Amino acid sequence: MSRPSPDHLLQETAQIAHHFHWSLDTILDLEHRDRQRFLDEIATMNDPGTAA
């Protein structure tokens, strides 16, 4: 898997920080695959059609 572009990394980081209030260092310590899993969870939480 290739690394995300700087713009994509910024978008990932901003979204995760916004939802989970994690520090930049914590988010950047995650592998890209793990950041993507958290972004998928955020999308699921924000989908009103998804049962909690």
Image (spheres, rainbow, N blue to C red):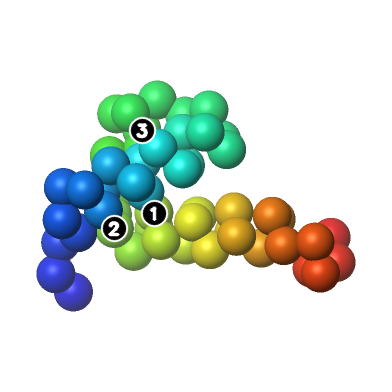
Along the polypeptide, which appears first: circle 3 or circle 2? Answer: 3
**What residue sits right under mark 2 in the picture?**
32
Q: Nearer the viewer, residue 11 or 52?
A: 11
Q: CA distance from mark 1 to mark 2?
A: 5 Å
Q: Amino acid at mark 3?
A: Thr
Residue at the image position 69 percent from the left and 55 percent from the top: 46
Residue at 46% x, 34% y: name it: 17
Question: At 80% across and 61% down in the image, what residue appears?
Answer: 48
Using residue 5 as the reference point, say whether residue 45 is left or right of it. Answer: right
**Would you identify the image quadrant in which residue 4 lies?**
bottom left
Q: Which residue is mark 1?
A: 35
Instruction: Identify the element where label 3 is drawn.
Output: helix
Residue 37 percent coordinates (x, y): 47, 62
Q: Earlier in the sequence, mark 3 or mark 1?
A: 3
Q: Position of residue 8 (x, y in %)?
A: 26, 53
Q: Residue at x 18, y 74 (%)?
A: 1
The CA span between labels 3 and 2 is 13 Å
Residue 26's disc number: 3
Q: Residues within 10 Å of mark 3 (few under 14, many from 20)?
A: few
Residue most extreme to the right: 51
**Furthest residue toward bottom:** 1
Q: Amino acid at mark 1?
A: Arg
Marks 3 and 1 sit apart, C-alpha to C-alpha, by: 11 Å
Whether tag 1 and tag 2 are in contact, CB under 8 A, the answer is yes
Identify residue type, mark 2. Answer: His
| Quadrant of the snapshot with the C terminus | bottom right
Mark 2: secondary structure: helix
Q: Residues within 10 Å of mark 2 (few under 14, many from 20)?
A: some
Whether tag 3 and tag 2 are in contact, CB under 8 A, the answer is no
| Quarter-of-image position of residue 33 | bottom left
